[in-house]
Image (spheres, rainbow, N blue to C red):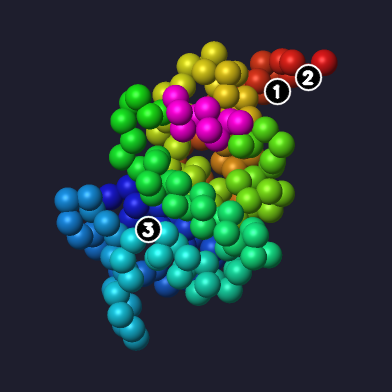
Amino acid sequence: MMALRELSSLEKSLGLKNPNKYCTQGDKKVPVLHSNNGPSLVGLVTIATHLVQEAKRPELLGGSAEHKALVQQWLEYRLTKVDGCHKDDIKTILKDLNSYLEDKVYLAGNQFTLADTLMYYGIHHIIVDLAIQEKEKHMNVTRWFDHVQHYTGVRHHLPPVVVLRNRVYTSGHH
């Protein structure tokens, strides 16, 4: 059901006026978009990409060929590593993201993309549960997360996560 909420929030953030009809299939509750004028679309990334194209926001899929590949890479990471991850995997995910985001504003460099939105939705439940010390330990993820949660229209169905800026952002930068 989480994927359906994500798609609904994405529709709102993209400014799409007519909400689509979704259902899920299988044990893993894979989202399905039933289209009036074409085949059904299956899968979170496939549907999300379609919505971005429907909203005529191609920049959210990446500008250059390299950026497009990076967006796809992070969308795939979300599906293969983050979704359904076990507690043991969370440390690795946070460590990977933290080192990757060390010199980047967003996942595909300096431009906000669909990858940021879907990764934000995907790790929200992880970040919510982090202790302050863990947020400080993964400072780059925390910075990125806070940036994305304040991006216009992203956070529709999720509660904000408190990030203590004074501790997170100033430690080690003097």
Residue 91: quarter of image? top left
Q: Nearer the viewer, mark 1 or mark 2?
A: 2
Which residue bears the numbered disc 2?
173
Q: Secondary structure at mark 2?
A: loop
> Would residue 147 be visible to someone looking at this image?
yes
Q: How many marks?
A: 3
Identify whether 165 is placed above or below 1: above
Q: Secondary structure at mark 1?
A: loop
- Which residue is painted at 37% across and 46% down in the image? 80
What numbered label is drawn on residue 169?
1
Identify whether 40 is placed above or below 131: below
What numbered label is drawn on residue 44?
3
Mark 1 vs 2: CB contact within 8 A: yes
Q: Amino acid at mark 3?
A: Leu
Residue 95 covered by magenta stretch: yes
- Which residue is painted at 42% across and 59% down in the image? 45
- Which residue is painted at 34% across and 86% down in the image? 37
- Give the Cα distance between marks 2 and 3: 38 Å
Mark 1 vs 3: CB contact within 8 A: no
Classify residue 86 as left or right of residue 57.
left
**Circle 3: is it few (<14), some (14-19), or many (20+) Cα within 10 Å?**
many
Residue 38 on image: x %, y %: 33, 83
> Would residue 161 be visible to someone looking at this image?
no
Q: Amino acid at mark 2?
A: His
Q: Secondary structure at mark 3?
A: helix
Residue that protrudes farthest toward the bottom in the picture: 37
Residue 18 covered by magenta stretch: no
- Give the Cα distance between marks 1 and 2: 8 Å
* Secondary structure, magenta segment, majority class: helix
**Circle 2: is it few (<14), some (14-19), or many (20+) Cα within 10 Å?**
few
Residue 161 on image: x %, y %: 51, 30
Which image quarter holds the C terminus?
top right
